[in-house]
Image (spheres, rainbow, N blue to C red):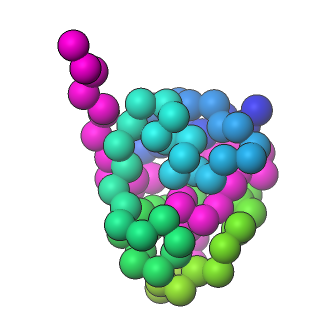
Amino acid sequence: MATIRINNATYIKSNPSNTLLETMENAGLEPEYNCRDGHCGACRCELVSGEVEYVGFAMAYTPENSVLPCICRAKGDVELSNVNYRLKEKQA
């Protein structure tokens, strides 16, 4: 399993069959997104290191070193920055 480093602070393990967005959600994070299919760009963040594999076609603008977590998977250890997320609130 790959390790995903987020904003130089959070480390999570990635299931190779999940997108980065799904991985973040499964780890208890609520990343910002709107579409889940690469159209809106709301989840766009910077790829600091590592490689990703796109599983969909990115319709949203993605500048160099940027990725759309909703449609890509980690090919190995990955470091992301400028990820907008919050922690899920625990239910009582």
The extreme front residue here reads 92
Give the x, y percent position of residue 8. Answer: 45, 39
Q: Residue at x 58, y 50 (%)?
A: 20
Queried whether the magenta region covers residue 80, the answer comes back as yes
Q: Which residues are magenta?
A: 64-92
Please say if 51 is above or below 85.
below
Q: Nearer the viewer, residue 90 or 43?
A: 90
Whether residue 44 sits left or right of residue 37 in the image: it is left
Q: What residue is at 64 percent from the left and 61 percent from the top? A: 72
90 to the left or right of 54: left
User: In the rendered picture of this protein, how many numbered marks are placed on residues?
Assistant: 0
The residue drawn where x is 53% and y is 72% is 37
Residue 11, compared with residue 56, is above or below; it is above
Residue 59 screen position, x and y as percent: 53, 86
Task: Using the rendered image of the protein, determine whether residue 50 is visible from the camera's viewpoint.
Answer: no
Please state, as top left, top right, bottom left or bottom right, where the C terminus lies in the image: top left
Coordinates of residue 48 in the picture (x, y in percent): 57, 56
Is residue 76 located in the magenta-colored stretch of the structure?
yes
Instruction: Please say whether residue 75 is visible from this viewpoint.
Output: yes
Quadrant (top left/top right/bottom left/bottom right) for the N terminus: top right
Residue 90: x and y in percent read 27, 21
Task: Using the image as rendered, state which of residue 16 and residue 8 is in the foreground.
Answer: 16
Q: Residue at x 70, y 37 (%)?
A: 15
Locate residue 62 relative to residue 56 in the image: left or right: left
Q: Nearer the viewer, residue 44 or 48?
A: 44
